[in-house]
Image: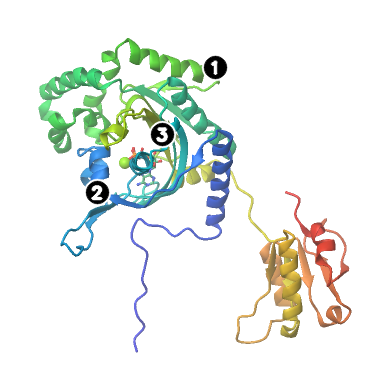
Amino acid sequence: MSKPPQIQAIKGMNDILPPESARWEWLEAVVRRVMAQHAYRNARTPIMELTQLFTRGLGEVTDIVEKEMYSFQDRQDKHGDADHLSLRPEGTAGLVRAVTEHKLLYDGGKRLYYLGPMFRRERPQRGRYRQFHQIGAEALGFGGPEVDAEMILLAVALWRALGIKNWRLELNSLGQPDERRAHRAALIAYFQQHESQLDEDARRRLHSNPLRILDTKNPAMQALAEAAPQLIDHLGEASLQHLAAVQGILRANGVEWRVNPRLVRGLDYYNLTVFEFITDSLGAQGTICGGGRYDYLIEQIGGKPAPAVGWAMGVERVLELLKEEGVAPPEPAPDAYAVIPDAAALPQAMRCLQALRAEGVAVQMHASTGAEGMGSMKSQFKRADASGARFALVFGADELAAGEVTLKALRDGAGAQQRLPLAEPAHWAASLKSTD
Ligand code: ATP
Ligand code: MG
């Protein structure tokens, strides 16, 4: 029989395995801690939603909805109807749907965060994948500028807790719909004047969504976009005051920013404050977090109107940045490695190990490959060393006959060799636990 060909992962979708997965767990633990400090609570929504949630929520003429979504038709039910489904390309629309569906805002605003995979059919490259992960925070039901600022400060607190230093903050205001309409007219007139310089995307968007043209990634169009009429010049008093209030809070917190009038974000649902955290350490994929206010999204997807603000950060990019900055999370290692010279000792040894684990000690047991016995002491100690454990516990025949186990230090400073009573692991378990 010929060997079947090996099956590989889908392009742009990554396996996250040890030792890399430990970095993910560390980051997630930091995120949970910082979110709790800011009183943000966890929310989990499905990875698939009805396609119309995204077309309605994100806007038909966005990169994501036009070309990046994984969408398909579900099987027909017994009436011959079939749903159009999409893998979620982002987390906000689903969260807003859930909050609306479950009337979470009935007793006031809610602060929520999520963590999980998103799917976009983009060209895979460093920092850009087809399954990638976002951490997102959303504050729903709050309209004041102080929550915009709280959101930004929350992201800054995360950078601090993670040890990330190379970031800068860009800020803009997209104003309100009426202000955008005035700007839109000016934009269309401007781009029409320069129609010959527009690329295909821009031409298509000229009348459907000219603001999107400012977000172009086409280098040939940068100068044109740069010189386009700016939304900030069309903002009224209230919008300007909202922006100024956010800035006042950032200033009081020692957070620096730059106003970037061309920052429009890739989705249609934003108004007033928008922001991005950008790093210079990751090349072209330098945006590590982006967000803003979206006061009209809840209504747009059928909920009772309520203001909201949020951001999402790209986990892969943040982890890459941590590497660039030399931040090394602690490598996980068991406290002790169980060396078991003879399989006859396994029942007694494993009973002791379970008791130690119940006391909070992390223990790795030597296990055979199955073909031959437990393996030589030498090879077992080699494994013990490689595990990173501070101690070896040796369950030899001599020890067991005496009702004991030998504790051996594998690292300097872990103490002298000693015999311990096998029957009372709870009495000595604490001495094996690492202090950090
Ligand atoms: P970009 O301009 O890089 O395409 P975006 O504006 O499409 O980003 P958002 O929709 O705002 O990104 O998502 C928030 C964050 O998620 C981004 O700032 C980025 O860190 C991350 N991100 C977005 N798309 C991807 C992807 N395909 N692979 C990895 N991370 C991504
Ligand atoms: Mg994108």
Q: In the picture provided, is 332 more to the left or to the right than 428?
A: left
Left or right, 138 with reference to 1:
right
Report the disc number at residue 51: 2
421 or 377: which is nearer to us? 421
Q: Residues within 10 Å of mark 1 (few under 14, many from 20)?
A: few
Which amino acid does the dot numbered 1 rest on? Ala
Residue shown at 50% from the left, 33% from the top: 155
Q: Which mark is residue 311?
A: none
**The quarter of the displayed image where residue 353 is located:** bottom right
User: Which SS class for mark 2?
Assistant: helix
Query: Which disc is residue 105 wearing?
Result: 3
CA gap between label 2 and label 1 equals 43 Å
Q: How is the image coloured?
A: rainbow
* Residue under label 1: 252
Chain-order first, disc 2 or disc 1: 2
In the rendered structure, which amino acid carries the disc numbered 3? Leu
Q: Amino acid at mark 2?
A: Thr
Residue 369 placement (x, y as % from top left): 60, 81
